[in-house]
Amino acid sequence: MQLFLPLAMIFVAQGFYCDRSVLSHHAAAVVQRGAHNQKESDWKAIASLTNRAYSEYDRNNKPESRRLFAEAADKLEAYLRKYETNSGRLSYLRVLVHLGALYQNADNLSQARIVFEQCERHQEFNSRAATLRVMGNGREVEESIANYVEAQLCFLTNCSKPEYKAAHDIVRITGGGSSRGDEIAPPFSLPTRKRHRHTRSRSPA
């Protein structure tokens, strides 16, 4: 009996450490899910403010519209710092484009220009994956981030570069321009990814 006692104690100890490992993994998964849910909640709050701001603009209540756009921009800045810690990623660029549009719509034109020019310098700016679905003239059009940003810079800089004017004209022709006029950056969403069997799609934002 004495020969088997140490072996039994080893099995008990191994079981204890295994349980601890499983519990630690479970706790980490719970924390990760909680962080993801908070990220989605924060994004939805920003989207809700943005939609309300566009609605107020369409009602010709421009002061309230600008206030809501400015509030959404403040929240998006915090979102960018909290969740988009890798500035080289495409998701960072997309959030940055959102931020520039919010600044423009809040009539903070100098800050909008700074942000859009930062977008121009991003390593993913001209990549094929850098696209948005722009709402303009009553329909949704897939547009490159480059065209969207340069079209807004055409307004912000009085078309100081030929490429800005070209992008502005392209966006107008494709229908991605804003029916509200150039002073308001048109709303957009991220492109829908094709789902493959046995895979899950993740929000790039």
Image (spheres, rainbow, N blue to C red):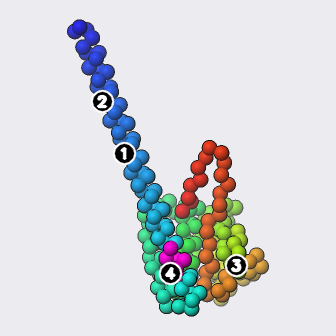
Q: Residue at x 49, y 72 (%)?
A: 46
The residue mark sitting in front, 4 or 3, is 3
Marks 3 and 2 in Cβ contact (< 8 Å)? no
Q: Disc 1 designates what residue?
A: 27
Q: Disc 2 designates what residue?
A: 16
**Does the magenta-highlighted stretch encompass residue 49?**
yes
Whole-Å distance between the Cαs marked 4 and 1? 38 Å
Q: Residue 41: give x, y in percent of width and height.
A: 45, 64
Whole-Å distance between the Cαs marked 3 and 2? 62 Å
Q: Residue 38: give x, y in percent of width and height.
A: 43, 61
Whole-Å distance between the Cαs marked 2 and 1? 16 Å
Q: Residue at x 45, y 66 (%)?
A: 42
Q: Secondary structure at mark 4?
A: helix
Q: Which residues are magenta?
A: 48-53
- Label whose residue precedes the other's in the sequence (3 or 1): 1
Q: Quadrant of residue 163?
A: bottom right
115 with respect to 42 (left or right) = right
- Label whose residue precedes the other's in the sequence (3 or 2): 2
Instruction: Look at label 4 and name its amino acid.
Output: Phe
Answer few, some or many: residues within 10 Å of disc 2's Cα (few below 14, many 20 plus, some between 14 and 19): few
Image quarter where the N terminus lies is top left
Location of residue 166 with respect to 63 vertically, above or below: above
Q: Secondary structure at mark 3?
A: loop
Q: Disc 3 designates what residue?
A: 138
Q: Residue 37: give x, y in percent of width and height.
A: 45, 58
Image mark for residue 69:
4
Whole-Å distance between the Cαs marked 3 and 1? 47 Å
Instruction: Look at label 3 and name its amino acid.
Output: Gly
Q: Secondary structure at mark 1?
A: helix
Instruction: Look at label 2 and name its amino acid.
Output: Phe
- Label whose residue precedes the other's in the sequence (4 or 1): 1
